[in-house]
Amino acid sequence: MTQQQITPLTSSEIERYARHIILGEVGGPGQQKLKRARVLVVGAGGLGAPVLQYLAASGVGTLGVIDDDRVSLSNLQRQIIHSTELVGSPKVESAARAIAAINPHVTVEAHEMRLAPDNAADLVSRYHIVVDGSDNFDTRYMLADVCLEQKRPLVSAALGRFDGSVTTLMPYAVNAAGEPNPSYRDLFPTPPPPGLLPACAEAGVLGVLPGVIGTLQATEVIKLITGIGEPLVGRLLLYDALSSRFETIKYRARRP
């Protein structure tokens, strides 16, 4: 990116992001990268809520959010970006209002629609990084395939009743050893049979759990944008809330 394309941080932004800027690993250049970044969050529910809130607070310049659902009272136990007064409103509208209240420097691109094969590639291609906050396997597999095709990093997560997992997918690239990074289908070759894993509405979910997992997703996005740390590429991070335990499983690209 040329110097002409860089918009200086305003005095208000410098004060707002001061705790980032004094971090040697982030600094002013890292905050500029966050400001220029475009991130698409698929789903404004349990996972999408903390992702959107923390990325907005961190200064990601443009946040796209796609969701075709409306806020319901039963969402509020875990989808903390929404409020009681906005029950019945489109989730993308509710999320946009919350983001504006957190950080007026962030541009929100609201897509009130369902991600589908006929719109996924176009949407994904407009952003630098994609976050999967969906709650069904059809969307997860489609999104992973499209991100591979469009060469976009995908931060993917899933929730159980008391547990969750996070990984970062960049299967279009190679690792330090020159080996291809694994894809979502390397980790999960096929979806589980219908009905094997009950949905949140049937099985329930601990209200704070999406906050833990979604915050980990937001952390992965910030690492990818700023180039700090080691993203969870080829690693699946597992969290068990009942035992307060984290574990990491390594996985590889399957050989042809």
Image (spheres, helix red, strand yellow):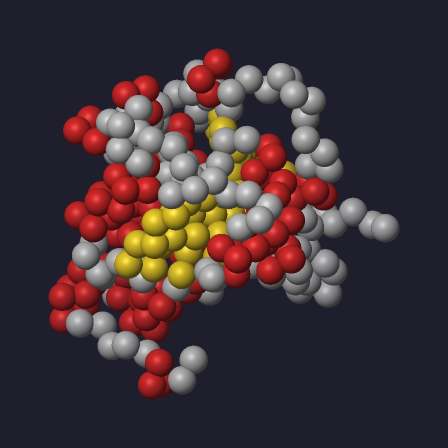
* Percent of width and height locating residue 98: 22, 43
Task: Write down the quadrant of residue 73 in the picture.
Answer: top left
Q: Residue at x 49, y 55 (%)?
A: 123
Q: Quick one: quadrant of the N terminus? A: bottom left
Residue at point 47%, 47% (across, down): 131
Q: Is residue 193 left or right of residue 120?
A: right
Q: Is residue 175 visible?
A: no
Residue lying at the far front of the rendered structure: 118
Quick one: 188 or 222, which is closer to the camera? 188
Q: Is residue 186 left or right of residue 152?
A: right
Image vertical order of residue 46 relative to residue 7, above or below: above
Please tell me which residue is depicted at 22% across the width and 61% down the height of the picture. Answer: 105
The spot of residue 200 in percent (x, y) is 46, 20
Q: Residue at x 31, y 36 (%)?
A: 90
**Is residue 117 visible to us here?**
yes
Eyeballing the image, is 231 above or below 242?
below
Q: Nearer the viewer, residue 190 or 146?
A: 146
